Image (spheres, helix red, strand yellow):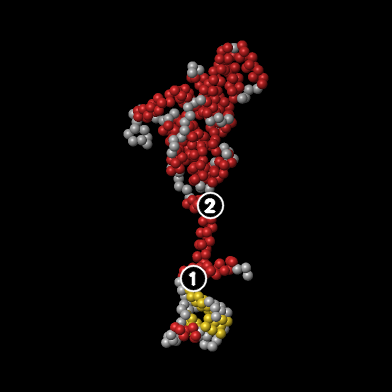
Amino acid sequence: MKCNAETIGLMHKYLDGDITTEEEQQLKYHLEDCEACQEHFRELKRTLTLIQSAERFEAPANFTANVMKNLPTEKKQVKYLRWFKMHPMLTAAAVFFILMFTGVFFTWEQDNQLVVSKQENLIIEGDTVIVPEGEVVEGDLLVKNGNLIINGTVDGNVTLVNGKLIDDDPLDNRGLMASVGEINGEFESVDQTFDWILYKLKGFAKKVFSFE
Amino acid sequence: MEQIIREKIILVKKGDQSAYEDLVSFYQNKIYQHCYRMLGNAHEAEDIAQEAFIRAYVNIHSFDEKRKFSSWLYRIATNLSIDRLRKRKPDYFLDAEVKGTDGLDMYSQLQSEGASLVEEVENNELQRYIHTKISELPPKYRSIIILRYLEEFSLKEISEILDIPIGTVKTRIHRGREALRKRLRHV
């Protein structure tokens, strides 16, 4: 039986890949002579083959879902970040519009004071801007948050924001109005917030696409 | 593959749960199977495998990305399984109500298991017999035999997973092999 304990040790070394060439020779010689050890070695090797054919098991179908359900909740921040990463175009568009609209509304909220483009020979009375009779205003005229009376001539475009074009003489009929004041350009009146935004956008688009 | 796993782990560390979902679905069968072999029944296997994945997620920050994630998972799963085996009450009666089921006891479990067994007995009889024989080994030999011959880890990896010296791994694997040889020699 002494041969067994020693040889079996060598067999296990062999199975673990730890055996030296010298020991392997020793094992080989012994196995040639000893039938009991031969049988033992055969059984060991066979056992390992058998172990590997043990029944296999697969996780239940809903396993992953169950694990995920039981995890502590993740940080909200990461959830948003992931969404942004998955939709880069939407994110870019959203950021663009947010910046743009806040910008526009901001200026809208701030601009409650009367603003008139810098031109000489304009008369300002309270919140009313008057182009006096017989005068010619050169260049584009912009009036914000005020009314405009044109008795003279404007040599350019007129933009009126949040205000009204007033006919100076209420008794005059409409046909006469044009003859009282004259605009040698486009007339544009912007009254509503929405129109104001459009106006801004138009200006923005013009700036973007002009190559001047 | 290792690289993909590593990237997923970095995402998980940043708090991204969906990256963890990928890891779970990738390793679920391995870990579940390991638990099943350690514990010997589907119900506890699912319970412990799930717990292992949750523990891994909660402690992901203590995981070193340079090491193998699978080894780490196996370590958690093995430790939890051995804990469960230790806590297992000796009075594991057949008529005890199975946790998480409504009024089901072990008799009905046996019945349903028996039904599926009849269908596949031809092919699976031997495989199941071997599984049973492995399950009958003492846990310290069982875990090593499973890791070595069914999950195919190296002796060095096993020593890392179980946090025991490589010499001890060898001694136990020798004894495990001898024990199984005695049990399977007549097959």
Kindly tell me whether residue A117 is visible in this rendering.
no
Q: Position of residue B135 (x, y in %)?
A: 46, 26
Determine the residue positioned at 43% across, 26% down.
Answer: B120
Q: Is residue A29 above or below residue B13?
A: above
Badge 1 marks a residue whose secondary structure is: helix
CA gap, disc 1 to disc 2?
34 Å
Q: Is residue A51 above or below residue A64?
A: above
Farthest-out residue, front? A175
In the rendered structure, the answer to whether residue B110 lies left or right of residue A145 reads left
Q: Residues within 10 Å of mark 2 (few under 14, many from 20)?
A: few
Residue in front for this viewpoint, A202 or B104: A202
Depth-wise, is mark 1 or mark 2 nearer the camera? Answer: 1
Q: Amino acid at mark 2?
A: Lys
Residue B41 quadrant: top left
Q: Position of residue A165 (x, y in %)?
A: 47, 80
Question: Could you tell me which quadrant the N terminus of chain B lies in?
Answer: top right
Residue in front for this viewpoint, A30 or A139: A139
Badge 2 marks a residue whose secondary structure is: helix
Q: Is residue A154 above or below residue B36?
A: below
Q: Amino acid at mark 1?
A: Trp
Q: Position of residue B93 (x, y in %)?
A: 36, 28
Disc sitting over residue A85 in the figure: 2
Q: Position of residue B162 (x, y in %)?
A: 53, 32
Residue, disc 1: A196
Q: Residues within 10 Å of mark 1 (few under 14, many from 20)?
A: some
In the rendered structure, the answer to whether residue A63 lies left or right of residue A88 reads left
